[in-house]
Image: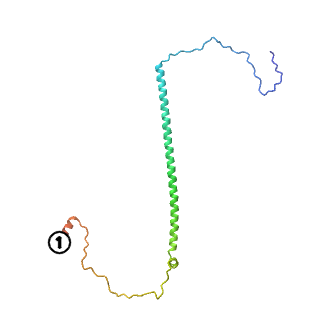
Amino acid sequence: MPRNFNKYQYETSPRKLEPEYTPVKNPYKSKKTTIRKIDPEKERAKVKQLKKQKRKAIKYLVIGFLVLFAISYRNSQIDENFAKVQNLKDELAEVQKQNAQLQVSIENGLNLNNLEQEAKEQLGMQKLNSKQTIYMILPKNDYIEPAAEEVIIEEEQSGIRGIINTISNIFK
């Protein structure tokens, strides 16, 4: 069939050329295969070994996940305790601030003018007049009597010295 190369092609892709020769495969040629004799005992041993390796891998994965879980749990506990400590510090700062304010207000309220004013207003007290003042004359005698007995203050002494002092006090 003659090809017509003069025709205009509207597509953007070029046209495909067909090969002139296609190789033919021999359908009678067989592939090379070697038949191995399979030993059932060796197969079972291999299967057991594969299962053992899989169990070991799963065991390591589980241990790894447990370790990661323990670490994350411990970190969450640390975060919770840190938050509690911060809250307690905030409460402490607030209480200290209130204490400082109360101390300042107490110190401001302790001056004599404030005490006098509170005594007049709340308790109904008044200043003393000269009529309410009573003067007493006391004699200048000494009312303290000297002790009639001698007071002996004993200090603790070492064992032998204490025994000697006790014996000497008996003979006095």
In the visual, does 81 lie left or right of 2?
left
**Is the N terminus in the top left, top right, bottom left or bottom right quadrant?**
top right
The residue most toward the top is 28
- Number of labels in the image equals 1
Q: Position of residue 122 (x, y in %)?
A: 51, 77
Q: Position of residue 154 (x, y in %)?
A: 25, 71
Q: Position of residue 19 (x, y in %)?
A: 73, 18
Q: Residue at x 50, y 71 (%)?
A: 106
Which of these two is toward me, 113 or 36?
113
Badge 1 amino acid: Ile
SS label for mark 1:
helix
What residue sits 52% from the left and 53% below the top? Answer: 83
In the figure, 39 relative to 141: above or below? above
Q: Residue 78 appears at what percent x and percent y? A: 50, 49
- Here the colouring is rainbow
Crowding near pointer 1: few (<14 within 10 Å), some, many (20+)?
few
Task: State the image quarter where residue 8 is shown.
Answer: top right
Residue 33's image quarter?
top right
Question: In the figure, 114 relative to 132: above or below?
Answer: above
Name the residue tied to disc 1: 170
Horizontal arrangement in the rendering, residue 151 relative to residue 112 (left or right): left
User: Which residue lies at the image location 47% right of the left edge and 32% below the top edge?
Assistant: 56
Q: Residue at x 50, y 30 (%)?
A: 54
Note whether 26 is above or below 155 in the view shown: above
Residue sitting nearer the eye, 97 or 167: 97
Q: Is residue 104 above or below residue 56?
A: below
- Pick the quarter of the image with the C terminus: bottom left
